[in-house]
Image (spheres, grey):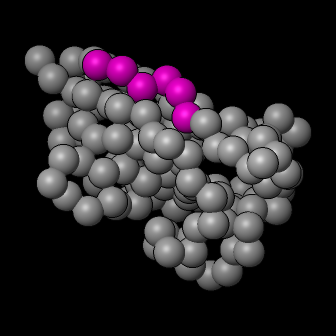
Amino acid sequence: QVQLVESGGGSVQPGDSLRLACAASGRTFSRSAMGWFRQAPGKEREFVAAIRWSSGGGTIYADSVKGRFTISRDNAKNTVDLQMNSLKPEDTAVYYCAADTSPGIIITASYVYDYWGQGTQVTVSS
C-alpha cells in the first residue's frame, strides 16, 4: 500500500520557522517528482514547491514562498522535506505532500500528481 505521511505542522508566530516532513512508503519514489501543495479555508489547493528526482533535484517554487521556503529530498530514505522560514499569516493552510510517478515538464499542477498525503495543518498567528 502506497502511503505519503506528512508531519511537522503546528501553530507558530509570524517570522517563525517550521520544517515539514513527508515519508513515503509502499514503493520507491526515487524517480518521482515530489511536491508540496497547500489549501487554506475557502480557497483552492495551490502549488507551493516541487523537486525533480534527478541528481541535484531541480526545484521550483511558487512566487509567494520563493526565498523563504526550501524543498529537499532524500531518495535513500524516501523522504521529502519543506523548510519554511519567515512564516506569514497568509501561509496558514493544510499542507499536502504529493508524488508524480511519471514526471513530465509540468510539475506545478496538482493534476499530474498520483499520490497524496493526508495533510498537516500549519497555522501562523500572533
Which residue, as the protein is rendered here, is positioned at the far front?
A: 1
First to last magenta residue range: 6-11
Q: Residue at x 52, y 61 (%)?
A: 60
Q: Inspect this view and state whether residue 17 appears.
A: yes
In the picture provided, is 75 more to the left or to the right than 60?
right
Left/right placement of residue 45 relative to residue 29 reads: left
Residue at the far bottom in the pictured view? 105
Q: Say if the magenta span includes residue 10.
A: yes
Is residue 70 visible from the viewing direction of this image? no
Residue 68 colored in magenta in the image: no
Identity of the residue drawn at 18% across and 42% down: 90
Relative to 34, is 104 above or below? below
Residue 19, percent across and down? 50, 27
106 is higher (above) or lower (below) than 35: below
Q: In which quarter of the view is residue 76 placed?
A: top right
Q: Residue at x 67, y 80 (%)?
A: 104
Residue 70 coordinates in the image, percent (x, y) = 51, 41
Q: Residue at x 19, y 58 (%)?
A: 43
Left or right of residue 21: residue 84 = left
